[in-house]
Structure formats: C-alpha cells, structure tokens
Image (cartoon, rainbow, N blue to C red):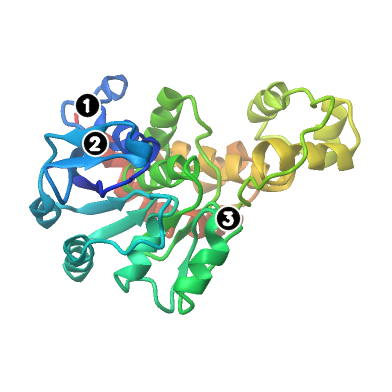
Amino acid sequence: MPHRVVVLVDEGINPFEVGVATEVFGLPRPELGRRTPLYELTLCTPAPGIRMNHGFFTLTGAAGLDAVDRADTLIVPGRPDNVVPRAEAVLDAIRYAHARGVRIASFCTGAFALAEAGLLDGRRATTHWRWAGEFRALHPKVLLEPDVLFVDEGDVLTAAGSAAALDLGLYLVRRDHGAEIANSVSRRLVFAAHRDGGQRQFVERPVPKVPDASLAPLLGWAQERLDRPLTVSALAARAGVSPATLHRRFRTELGTTPLAWLLGERVALACRLIERGEERLDVVARRSGLGSAANLRARVKRETGLSPSAYRRRFRTGVDAGR
C-alpha cells in the first residue's frame, strides 16, 4: 500500500495550503515510470461542508474525521483566526493520531492547532513570522523558532509561511523516497528542490528601485561544476559582482548564503549518485565536490540522518520496488 496522507481541513482553512498538499502528495507521477503512486491522499473534514478562508468556497464531499484513523501522515493546514479555539473533535483527532504514532505536519499557522492539542509543549516548532508574537502569547511552553522555514522534530514537523509548506512537503518526499524522486517532484512543481529548513523566512523588506538580475544563470553554471573547487570569489567573479554583493543577492533571492547553497547542492548530488548505484564513496565525494569519503559520510548523515550505506539500502532499491 502507498503511504497514506490525510489532510485535516478545518473551518476557515487557507485553500493554498490544501492545494500544496494535493500537488505534492495527491497527484500521479507518470514521469517517474511507477506503477504505484508515491502516496494515497485523502481530505477529511469535521463537517459535511467546510467554508474555506474568507468564504471563497465550501468544500464538500470529503471524508469524515474517521479517515485520520487510517493515516500514516496527518497534515494540518493553517487558518488566520488563530485565537478562535478549534473544535474538540478536531483536537481529539490530532491527539489520537499522535498517540497512534502517525507522523504529523502543520503548514503555516496549522502549528496553532498542534500546540492547542498539546503536541508541541517543550518542543521546537515554527509558524509564519507574522503570527509569532500571538503564538508565543497563547503557547509559551513551545520552543518557537520564528525565523526558519520548517522544523523537524521527528514525529512532528512544522512549516512556516504558506510557501514553506512546499519546502516541507518536498523534504518529506526526500525523506520517504530519496533525493532523486524529490528532485523529479520539484521539477514538476517548478520549485527549488532543496531549501534547508534552517534558512530564514522571507520577512517584509523594502523593494529595491532597480532589482538585481536573476541568479539562475549563475546557479546553472555552478551546478554543472560541482566536482570542481568553487569559492564565493569564483562565483562572484562569474557573476561580475563583489563577494559582498553576491552574498546579499543570495540572501535576497534564495534566503541562504552562497556556501550553504553550494553545500546543499553537493549533498543532493551525492545522494543522487548513491541512489543510482555508485558504491565507491571516494568517487561520489569527488564527483559531488565533497572532497573526501569522511566528509561525504558526515554531510550525508547530517542531511538525511542516514549513513551513505544505509541511504543506499533504503533508496537504491526503493525506486525499482515501485515499478
């Protein structure tokens, strides 16, 4: 059976985040050449008709809350009226899923629901930066990290603003199925495949009068040369700017630093090489630009939680098994 993802759609939920869950976990992936889908998606609601945020439309025909009983992963999207208590039936469904060992993820202000259900006390979590103060006032026992894209606490994960739901969704796909499949899904979404959860949220800032040119050509150039020594100075020279300007542009466009972006791309490439069957770690390290097998082991372990050999066992046959 595919991994079963259930999205709990409560009154006033933002439709964008429901759409994110549908796009990432609900669509077939013919481009992967699989006979079986990656996930089985179900929308569930606490009532037969649920009005979405601002009454844009009413969702009908979804499953009832009993669908949570069959979930492997439960997703709780956000809503803007966070001071209004959730229905007890909704909170009970979340609590029961957690007690049963279901992986639970919140999108944007869905973290309020998880906190209200008591799942986040004493644990790290995030939510949209705009509601950070309100969250702290309502849930002071939660270790809120308002500047990051998402937080992974193992069985409970929380994403920041709505677009960060895509980051967390792709992170879950990568955790479940490996970098190769996650990259295919991200290409289908025309979205960055890898933005680390520790990157900062895009908070409000003045729009420059003359915006910088896109980094896309530079990123493509660097991605073709990951096996070579690449420094910030070399990237800046290629872009025709100073290192300080390049750093500022990376922060503005990608929310990260040039070196952090390079490291993320190299680890992602290393994971793809391992998935494709390369067993010589020194070769993987050299081709991905990570230098040594020891550095490769440390970086892959930090990113995926698995050693390269464990990663190979988990994901090298995972693609073939679904065909």
- Give residue 7's position: percent from left, percent from top: 24, 46
- Give residue 6's position: percent from left, percent from top: 21, 47
Name the element at disc 1. loop
Tell me which numbered mark, 3 or 1, is placed earlier along the sequence.
Answer: 1
Label 3 sits on what residue type?
Answer: Trp
- Say which quadrant the C terminus sits in: top left
User: Which residue corresponds to mark 3?
Assistant: 129
Label 2 sits on what residue type?
Answer: Leu
Name the element at disc 2. loop
Quadrant for residue 111, please give it. bottom left
Contact, mark 1 vs mark 2 (Cβ under 8 Å): yes
Quadrant for residue 106, please give it. bottom left
Above or below for 140 versus 220: below
Q: CA distance from mark 1 to mark 2?
A: 8 Å
Tell me which numbered mark, 2 or 3, is placed earlier along the sequence.
Answer: 2
Q: With 20 as the anchor, is 273 left or right in this view?
A: right
- Give residue 211's position: percent from left, percent from top: 79, 26
User: Which residue corresponds to mark 2?
Assistant: 38
Above or below for 101 versus 49: below
Q: With 118 as the anchor, is 299 left or right in this view?
A: right
Residue at point 11%, 34% (across, down): 61
User: Which residue corresponds to mark 1?
Assistant: 34
Number of marks present in the image shown:
3
Q: Nearer the viewer, residue 62 or 280?
A: 62
Label 1 sits on what residue type?
Answer: Arg
Q: Residues within 10 Å of mark 3 (few under 14, many from 20)?
A: many
Q: With 132 as the anchor, is 309 left or right in this view?
A: left
Judge depth for marks 2 and 3 and give the one in front.
Answer: 3
Residue at point 62%, 41% (across, down): 286
Above or below for 150 versus 285: below
Residue at point 26%, 28% (across, down): 27
